Image: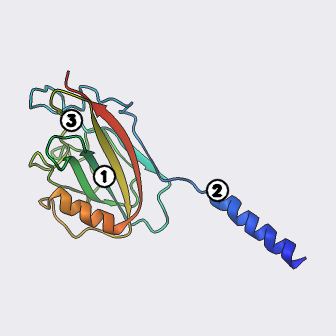
Amino acid sequence: MKQLAMLLLVLLGFQAMSKAQTFTLKSNDLGGQFTHKQLFNSFGYSGENVSPQLSWENAPAGTQYFAITMYDKDAPTGSGFWHWVVFNIPASTSSVPANAGNITKNLMPAGAVQGVTDYGVAGYGGPAPPAGAAHQYLFTVYALKSRLDLNANTSPAMVGFYLNSLVLAKASIVAYAQHP
């Protein structure tokens, strides 16, 4: 009888684990391809440079802060290109509105830091790929176990180093852009 009870407890445990929700990132503004609204306004582009709306759900227990990055691994730099780096987003946050990457609008939650990008300025810098193949842009939200003790001038690579040392979970989506 004890063995049957133990087996039932194990099976219930597996069932509960299989129903655990996955940390997920979504956007109402992205459908696989960037629109003119999200594209950069330079380098031959006349986009509006509006960061997309993002929302996430099912962050793991213990999440204290979130971070958001947008990275182009296909940039012809030898090291990719960081288009958006935001960290120290409070754990009570589950979304950011469109254009939150515009640092003059103050749409990020209090305490969030928008770091410098590879464009050399803080905030969102939309896609502006050179002519050729489509580029893949990876948006990632990081659930973090603690705050990053960094400032807005910290390089994106250094922010990434600290993000990966504090990450509990990551959720990503991909969008593509190609020079017209």
The quarter of the rendered structure image containing the N terminus is bottom right
Mark 1 or 3, which is nearer the eye?
Answer: 3
Q: Residue furthest bottom?
A: 2
Mark 1 or 2, which is nearer the eye?
Answer: 2
The quarter of the rendered structure image containing the C terminus is top left
Q: Residues within 10 Å of mark 1 (few under 14, many from 20)?
A: many
Separation (CA) of disc 1 from disc 2: 27 Å
Q: Earlier in the sequence, mark 2 or mark 3?
A: 2
Q: Mark 3 sits on what residue?
A: 127
Question: Which amino acid is tagged 3?
Answer: Pro
Pointers 2 and 3 in contact (CB under 8 A)? no
Nearest the eye: 77 or 28: 77
The residue at the point 23 percent across, 35 percent down is: 50
Question: Which amino acid is tagged 2?
Answer: Ser
Separation (CA) of disc 2 from disc 3: 38 Å
- Helix, strand or loop at label 1? It is strand
The tally of labels here is 3
Q: Earlier in the sequence, mark 1 or mark 3?
A: 1
Q: Earlier in the sequence, mark 1 or mark 2?
A: 2
Q: Quadrant of the rendered structure where residue 178 is? A: top left
Q: Mark 1 sits on what residue?
A: 68
